[in-house]
Amino acid sequence: KQNDLSCPVITTNDINRNSRQILDYFQKIKPDVVLIFGTSMIKDPLFKKLPKNTINLHLGLSPRYRGSATLFWPFYFLEPTYAGSTFHFITGEPDAGDIIHQVTPRLQKGDGIHDVACKVVIESTKHAVKILNKLSKNEVKGVKQKSTGKKFLTTDFRPEHLRVIYNLYDNKIVDYYLNGELKCKKPNLVKQKFL
């Protein structure tokens, strides 16, 4: 007979308000590794109870793109090569922990902003299981972030920003880049050797 490991369902907005429910769940299952994805900042008392091997899957390349809407901003700033994700150890500061691994998708003609965002999520999930397996064996080390980059707040985004992507570039920023009409550097990614 298997133990009842049914997971509590809590919205991202309630992660800190209902931390007692999660703390009770942690006490029950005693995780060695935790993967966080899509939540707001985790605060005490829950933050203190997370195991050493707690990582965040951040949709954005830290430190350049931290905070909110970090798959949107690379397109707004005409840097489609910087649309990616970062696996990093969790800290008390947003998206600032030691980087474990970064992922960018293969850009192809016809990719729009939403295509690239979906590709980032798909590629990241392929890497997540391998990273978690290595973490559980303490075979992963992080790399300190050398700069602070830009932390985008939810309030930084305004619908008018979409005019750059849709009205000026007709959602073909990737095509402009692949055709050599947009110059942007490729990011220097942190990669684990086993991936």
Image (cartoon, rainbow, N blue to C red):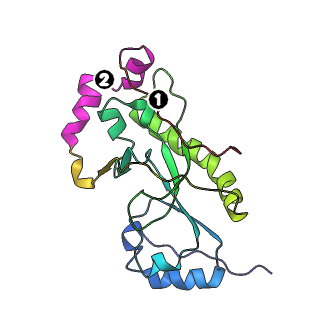
* Image-based side of 158 in relation to 103, left or right: left
Q: Observer-nearest residue: 56 or 125?
A: 56
Query: Would you say residue 6 sits in the magenta stretch?
Result: no
Q: Secondary structure at mark 2?
A: loop
Q: Which residue is mark 1?
A: 186
Amino acid identity at mark 1 = Lys
The Cα atoms of the two marked residues, 2 and 1, are separated by 23 Å
N-terminal-most mark, 2 or 1:
2
Q: Nearer the viewer, mark 2 or mark 1?
A: 1
Q: Secondary structure at mark 1?
A: loop
- What residue do we see at 42% from left, 13% from top? 179
- What residue do we see at 68% from left, 81% from top? 4
- What residue do we see at 63% from left, 47% from top? 127
Residue 25, picture quadrant: bottom right
Q: Quadrant of the N terminus?
A: bottom right
Query: Would you say residue 167 sits in the magenta stretch?
Result: yes
Residue 170 is tagged as 2
The magenta region covers: 159-181
Crowding near the residue tagged with mark 1, few <14, some 14–19, many ≥20 C-alpha atoms within 10 Å: few
Q: Is residue 136 above or below residue 154?
A: below
Q: Quadrant of the C terminus?
A: top right
Q: What is the x, y in percent for residue 114?
A: 42, 37
Q: What is the x, y in percent for residue 19?
A: 44, 80
Residue 61, picture quadrant: top left
Q: How many marks?
A: 2
